[in-house]
Amino acid sequence: MFKDEVTIRVKSGRGGNGGVSFRREKYEPFGGPDGGHGGKGGDVIIVTDRNLNTLYHMVHVTKFRAEDGGKGDISNCSGKNGRDVVLRVPIGTIVRDIDKNVIIKDLDTEGGRVIIAAGGKGGRGNKTFATPVNQAPRRFEKGGEGEERKIFLELKLIADAGLIGLPNAGKSTLIARISSARPKVADYPFTTLQPYLGIVDGGDFRTCVVADLPGLIEGAHQGAGLGDKFLRHIERTRMVVHLIDVSPQSDQPPVEAYRIIRKELTEYSRDLAEKREIVVATKMDVTGAEKGLRRLKKEIEGEVIPISAATGKGIDLLVRRIFADLSR
């Protein structure tokens, strides 16, 4: 199950108290203080994992606490350091402190790592406080408190290209055709309720990641339909592939469909609207689609690539164009 937002509470371990002890050996009954330092409390750490593409594994367990450090021991032995808690998240996860309303880290690379709650420092043992005047101190230092934070995790999928368009524009059928991704395909709106990632083979050892994003409708940037819940994922893509159903069965005239999506992108983010775009006319196997294609080409600037994901028409050309644009 896909989940791209989750709130968690974390607490690092408390540092161990310093030890209070004195050497008691056969020939040194007054050997002096030898209390060791307390151990450091465990950290709470977030790291990226390339094998994850959802935050669903953190939905049911939302509180995480690292281990406290151990107390300082005799013979100047330090206490054991507390075990860290390591949380794994998908690449593209943004880590935000809710109370301070600041972004701690944007984990947008493989191997990304951030300590979100540092463990408390271990306290000093009584040996540290020995002086010529006070050679047998019973003073020790308490361990530092751990950090407690409320964290909001937001996932923005990272893909080279994002498939966008109105519901039933043919996005799921296309990604199933050009990759091994297998999203649900049906003839009713909002078949895709979560993003799907597919790896496309461009030949000559070239690959790219394409994201099938749920269909947008008018008012999506304000939360209509599936709303801006999935618009955030398009922000990570390097380019968009805009699919438009030009068949007579389409709910919207092709030109109107194009303008609706362009408006939503612009209203949501200017940077999003300025991404490179490939316009694709879909369902060219349907009788009457040629008429819709001509109208679309007449009204918008730039090239329109006609395809049929059902028959494979135009698919090779589209894939070549995607790789060409990504190589710029």
Image (spheres, rainbow, N blue to C red):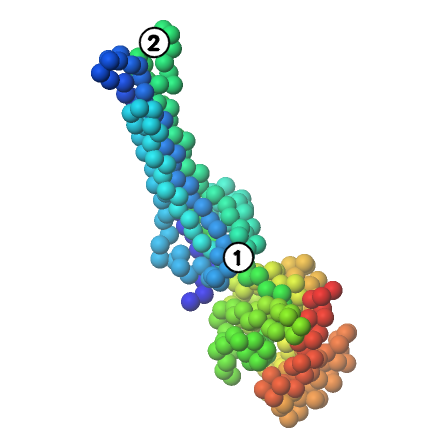
Mark pair 1, 2: CA separation:
56 Å
Relative to the observer, which residue lies in front, 237 or 130?
130
**Where is mark 1, residue-wise?**
91
**Which amino acid does the dot numbered 2 rest on?**
Asn
Q: Secondary structure at mark 1?
A: loop
**Which amino acid does the dot numbered 1 rest on?**
Ile
> Residue lying farthest top?
133
Q: Position of residue 85 (x, y in %)?
A: 39, 46
Q: Position of residue 263 (x, y in %)?
A: 66, 67
Q: Residue at x 33, y 31 (%)?
A: 79
Q: In this picture, is 296 found above or below 73? A: below
Q: Is residue 95 left or right of residue 123?
A: right
Residue 154 in view: no
Other residues around mark 2 within 10 Å, as few (<14) / some (14–19) / many (≥20): few
Q: Residue at x 39, y 34 (%)?
A: 40
Q: Position of residue 165 (x, y in %)?
A: 61, 73
**Where is mark 2, residue-wise?**
134
Q: Secondary structure at mark 2?
A: loop
Q: Position of residue 70 (x, y in %)?
A: 32, 33
Image mark count: 2
Which quarter of the figure has residue 162?
bottom right
